[in-house]
């Protein structure tokens, strides 16, 4: 029988029961109330300092980091999960890790990729003593400021992983390639290369292509039919080109020559989410980028994203981000 470490989660929160079958022990955890409004988001650098008390290396700029992780290190992430403005990708190499995501318990095994994005309701419950992984962390602001990477995140990351499950089971070859790319990033981080930042950005983009490929493979393996798979992937590819202008299901259904009801049923069958979940997530990502990286007035951003007016945009952004657009921008500029 494997031995496990069990972790308590922050107490500001609602109870959730889990039965840990390995030792037939039942205990209460406390998970974040999903209706709670998060007004504090830590940058990657601030989150790292909060967890470890210091930066991983003296000259680290807080933009991209990749390194080995174990049970103790991983548990510290509970201090900032839900509050960290960063994307993280953890590849499980050995042992296992149990998390709770959106009230659902997930166990991560070797070859699984665990993905975290800003604000995700995730809590780490326990890890085997031999748990070992490799973790890639990229600051949200850094991601949104790199146009090519931002487009990849929109296409390959947010539509499927963020809205469905943070767990990607990889086949052996894919897991090996991802591990190799993560180790390349580690090597560059610790190098003195004069173009270190540029290389890291490119390696990050290549890594996201691997994530996209893994997602499409999973869709093919779990498809209800070839036709459903084709429609769903076509819908996902339409989104990055049209989400800013078209917020309605009818448009995408028309582009695919099917009814809105049929498109809704396919998306829900494949992912368990709705068409509007996908549209709204890309709108939120683009709005966040515009607020962080441009000086455009909020009214102009609302118009650019085809909201009826500034008030409706502010209501949308506040509901999904947990903070009003002006306050979000002010926090970024602070």
Image (cartoon, helix red, strand yellow):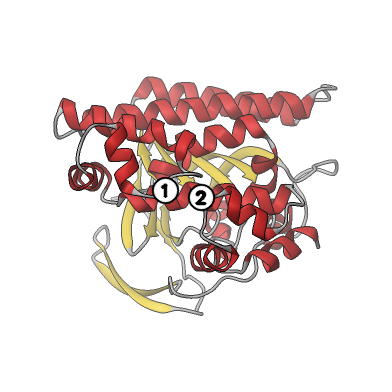
Is there any visible trace of residue 92 in the rendered image?
no
Residue at the outermost left position: 225
- From the top left corner, tell me how far across and down residue 240 is, in percent: 48, 36
Task: Name the one closer to the observer, 82 or 284.
Answer: 284
Q: Position of residue 268 (x, y in %)?
A: 23, 48
Tell me if I can see residue 34 in this picture. yes
Quarter residue 147 falls in:
top right
Q: Is residue 259 left or right of residue 200?
A: left
Left or right of 175? Residue 23 is left
State the SS at label 1: helix
Task: State the residue in front, 83 or 136.
Answer: 83
Query: Do the numbered discs 1 and 2 sit on residues whose CB atoms are within 8 Å?
Result: yes
Label drawn at residue 279: 1
Neighbor class of circle 2 (other Cα within 10 Å; few <14, some 14-19, many 20+) is many
Q: Residue at x 69, y 47 (%)?
A: 141
What is the tally of numbered marks visible in this picture?
Answer: 2
Left or right: residue 127 versus residue 153 is left
Q: Residue at x 62, y 69 (%)?
A: 324
Mark 1 neighbour class, 10 Å CA radius: few under 14, some 14 to 19, many 20 or more: many
Outermost residue, front side: 308
| Residue 327: x %, y % from top left | 69, 68
Q: Which of the labelled discs sits on residue 187, or is there none?
A: none
Of the 4 image quadrants, the one containing the C terminus is bottom right
Residue at the spot of label 2:
283
Disc 2 on helix, strand or loop? Answer: helix
Residue 202 is situated, as x and y percent measured from the top left of the image, at 65, 24
- Residue at the image point whose x is 49% and y is 46% from the top: 282
- Mark 1 and mark 2: span between their CA atoms? 6 Å
């Amino acid at each position: 029988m494997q031995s496990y470490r069990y972790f308590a989660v922050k107490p500001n929160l609602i109870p959730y029961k889990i039965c840990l079958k390995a030792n037939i022990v039942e205990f209460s955890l406390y998970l974040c109330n999903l209706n709670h409004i998060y007004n504090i988001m830590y940058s990657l650098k601030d989150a790292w300092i909060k967890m470890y008390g210091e930066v991983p290396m003296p000259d680290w700029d807080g933009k991209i980091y990749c390194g080995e992780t174990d049970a103790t290190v991983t548990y510290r992430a509970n201090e900032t999960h839900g509050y960290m403005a960063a994307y993280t990708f953890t590849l499980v190499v050995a042992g296992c890790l149990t998390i709770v995501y959106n009230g659902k318990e997930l166990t991560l095994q070797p070859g699984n990729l665990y993905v975290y994005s800003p604000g995700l309701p995730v809590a780490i419950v326990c890890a085997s003593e031999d748990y070992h992984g490799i973790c890639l962390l990229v600051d949200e602001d850094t991601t949104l400021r790199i146009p090519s990477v931002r487009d990849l995140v929109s296409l390959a990351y947010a539509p499927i992983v963020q809205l469905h499950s943070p767990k990607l089971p990889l086949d052996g070859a894919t897991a090996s390639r991802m591990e190799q790319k993560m180790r390349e990033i580690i090597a560059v981080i610790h190098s003195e290369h004069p173009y270190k930042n540029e290389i890291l950005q490119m390696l990050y983009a290549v890594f996201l292509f691997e994530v996209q490929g893994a997602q499409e493979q999973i869709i093919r393996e779990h498809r209800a039919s070839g036709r459903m798979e084709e429609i769903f992937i076509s819908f996902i590819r339409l989104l990055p080109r049209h989400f800013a202008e078209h917020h309605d299901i009818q448009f995408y259904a028309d582009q695919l020559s099917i009814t809105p009801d049929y498109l809704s049923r396919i998306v829900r069958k494949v992912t368990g989410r709705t068409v509007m979940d996908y549209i709204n997530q890309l709108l939120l990502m683009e709005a966040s980028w515009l607020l962080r990286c441009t000086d455009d007035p909020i009214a102009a951003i609302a118009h650019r994203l085809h909201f009826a007016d500034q008030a409706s945009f502010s209501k949308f952004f506040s509901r999904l981000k947990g903070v009003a657009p002006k306050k979000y921008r002010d926090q970024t500029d602070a």
